[in-house]
Amino acid sequence: MNASRYGMVIDTRTCVGCAACVIGCKAENDVAEDYSRDWIRTLLTGEYPSLRMAIHSERCNHCDHAPCVQVCPTGASHRGPAGTVQVNPAKCSGCKACVAACPYDARFIDPRSGAAEKCTFCMHRLEKGLHTTSCQEICPTRSIYFGDLDDPSSQVSRLLATREWYVLKPDAGTRPKHFYLK
Amino acid sequence: MKRREFIRVASVGVAGTAALGGVTTDWYGLYGNPTVDPGTDGDRVVPSFCELCFWKCGILAHVKDGRVTKIKGNPRDPLSQGQLCPRGAGGTGLLYDPDRLKRPMIRRDRRGSQEFQEVSWDDALDVVAENFEKIKANHGASALALFLHGYGGNWMRHLFQAYGSPNIAAPSYAQCRGPRDVGFNLTYGWGVGSPERTDIMHSRCLVLIGSHLGENMHNTQVQEFAEAVRRGATVITVDPRYSVAASKSAEWMPIKPGTDLALLLAWMHVILGEGLHDREYLAAYGYGFEQLQEHVKPYSPEWAYTRTGLDPDQIRRTARMMVAARPATLIHPGRHVTWYGNDTQRSRAIAILNALLGSWGRRGGFFVPSSMDIPSYEYPGYLEEGGDPVDKPDPSDYPLADEALAQGICEATIPGVRGESRIKGWMVYGSNLPITLPNPEQTARAIQELEFLVTVDVLPSEIVGWSDVVLPEATYLERCDELFNPPWRQPYVAVRQEVVPPMYDSKPGWWIARELGKRIGLPEFFPWEDSMEYAKTRLELAGLDCDVLREDGVILGEPGPLYFEEGAPPVFHTDSGRIELYSQRLAAHGFDPMPTWHDEEVEDPPPGYYRLLFGRSPVHTFGRTTNNRLLSEVMDENEVWVNRKVAERWGLDHGERVYLQNQDGVRSSFSAPVKVTERIHPDAVYMVHGYGRNAPKLRRVHGRGIDDNELITRYKVDPIMGGTGMNVNFVTFLRAADVEGAERADGREEGAS
């Protein structure tokens, strides 16, 4: 794994919100029943018949300034490899401070382990030498891009350099690493 | 595992490291942070193809310790290309559905009472065989009908052809794609096939008419739709609902439901009136151009406005957009097109509009597919009992139907509907007729008339509850099936193979068909040991290696020319051998030879009623998947979409539960929440099909949401091919609080008397 700062770019122009990312993640990561690490959000503006709609596939933003890491009393939430945010369930006391601190509502307590849970950017895949996250791999519209934001030649860097984009809740000061292409 | 135990196990795992540091405490902070691996990678990865819908995408199933952990797309497969839709990704939710049929069952009480006794396969099959033979002896083989849906149905079809009954019907014809296939056949002498020969990927202008790609997850089409959008194609969506596809479109045309044909005619009027059609193409291949030009003269955009409610400028503008991109303009033929009873003519209009733009056989329009030639297994000839299916008692009824009609067989079962009853027994394979055929009350009557009903299914669906004998089939992950070699861009063949052995006492379809065949004296039609031997024999005849196929999941052939400009032959199997803008065959049968608007064909909703429209969710395939645990986590109930202004008029709040009642006074069995939205035409309400299920043994979905099919008591039959137009019902709202309050009051009175 040579990347130094992983980020995800999602093309809202092509995403249809089918939730293949959600189901694929649940299977890949054996996520607890009735919980999921990613989800679909639809944003509608306008009045019939002048409408606009954006569809988002959302998950943990792996923020550069991550409130979940700052508030964690045990060090379970920590800065993982390549700028990602990870949880070590063995250290987690299940206090939910991180769940409350996350402005994106990306965390939950896994009822099986009692520990905080969220998207890992499929770190277990990346460490095995796979270059994709599960959601990216399965996406039928290929709307999810993943790679090193610090590498100017990576696809994510090139997309961010050439397309208009936005992040969620920029005012939260978290410097999220999920970018939505307009 | 409880959290404390988890921590304990984890500390054992790092004890070695801690000991090396000489630290004996278990203070959290001293441990490293190992990456958590969910451990879902398979110790075996088995290629196969999916059956969560009928698209048949290539998959890779991961198996660990005998359990399927996850399903991925097979990158070699031309349909999935390594990607999957949510349903395909959720296939384990079917395999491990706790509600699955587990053992063969025989009915104990009256039909429909849902009282069954579990029996051995021998006993169940003996009863089925005995009834098959009895029906043949007393009424002839054609008195036994087969309804089927899904790829495993091929084995049952083979059984019925050997048995000698022509009455084999798939609701996917007359309740779904039939009018489209007939409309395109009449025009080009070719259907559009499945998977459709649409070259969406290369389209510069894509026109979707009621086709909600992105919610309708035909994987390859959705992949190509996204690719077309990425490449900057212009998308035009005609839909009374602001669909996901509409949100990707340059133009959304919120048409008044039922008036699509008027729009299509107006588009032709603009294109021909302004001389923007593909002259060379039509001169080379067209038939009846002058008649069509004359025919569409009255259909101006202003004329269409009074029917469709669409701005005439938008109609002109979109027509010119289509022209600007031609021939890479694709007016998508759709798939579920049984809407209003004029569906073959509407599909004809779509076919003709494509011809005016020169898109058939052209890049970005419709490509010319090719398939891998794999010889059939050599059986003795099928037995001839003879003649047409019973749904065609009089050949003049639906002269251009080219498959049996499921509702026709249903009608022919009931004495008096189509003369005397001529169908005495049904076998139903993977086809849940009570929520598939319109007018479920008629379906229930037909079932009560039957001498015998056997169902082969995976789940305890509604039809299972009505059956005399229930045969539990293994799921697609537990069985091998017929080879799949569809016409596509590139010829190929895919294999379905057993990923894990069948659970419980379920059996694969090939085994069920073979055992029945042996019992009814047709062993010569089942000479193979199992379906893999059958597949291997066919592959050897084609010179293909079965082991390679099983290893890779697919074998690819050499692509041929895809377009006329690449040398694909422009062949049209019509009467004139040309593209028939004017259909001689339709004229000969007394139908409009060119699509014609008839005002009387469209009914307006009565006051206080709204047209009932239904469609699909990306996470479900009709009612087949709504009990799937993984998929229902994303969507576990349907909603009634109501335009915001309509909701305000009724005082309905977002999320408030309602029952729906149709124009015939039929009320839904269950309630559903209202979705107050800007995204739907004020004349209509919309629901996702597959909910409001009555089957009590589908424990996850039972009673969730509303079943649109209960409310489809009327259908308008397409006079050309017998398709059932189902978007002709109107519903009104009943507040759940009122309905349930009244029911409680009734209950008290009855209790008191």
Image: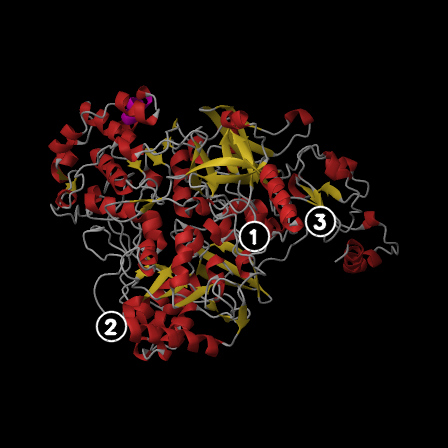
Mark 3 surroundings within 10 Å by alpha-carbon count, few (fewer than 14), some (14 through 19), many (20 or more): some
How far is the residue under mark 1 from the one under mark 2?
42 Å
Mark 2 surroundings within 10 Å by alpha-carbon count, few (fewer than 14), some (14 through 19), many (20 or more): some
Chain of the residue under label 1 = B
Question: Disc 1 marks which residue?
Answer: B702
- Disc 3 marks which amino acid? Asp
Q: Nearer the viewer, mark 1 or mark 3?
A: 1
Q: Which mark is residue B383?
A: 2
| Residue A153 seen in this snapshot | no
Residue A86 is situated, as x and y percent measured from the top left of the image, at 69, 44
The answer to whether B753 appears left or right of B230 in the picture is: right
> Is tag 1's residue or tag 2's residue first in the polypeptide sequence?
2
Taking the spot 53% from the left edge, 68% from the top edge, the residue there is B116
Is the residue B565 above or below the residue B379 in the image? above
Mark 1 surroundings within 10 Å by alpha-carbon count, few (fewer than 14), some (14 through 19), many (20 or more): some
Residue B142 is situated, as x and y percent measured from the top left of the image, at 28, 67
Instruction: Give the residues drawn in magenta, as a range.
Output: B314-320
Question: Disc 3 marks which residue?
Answer: A110
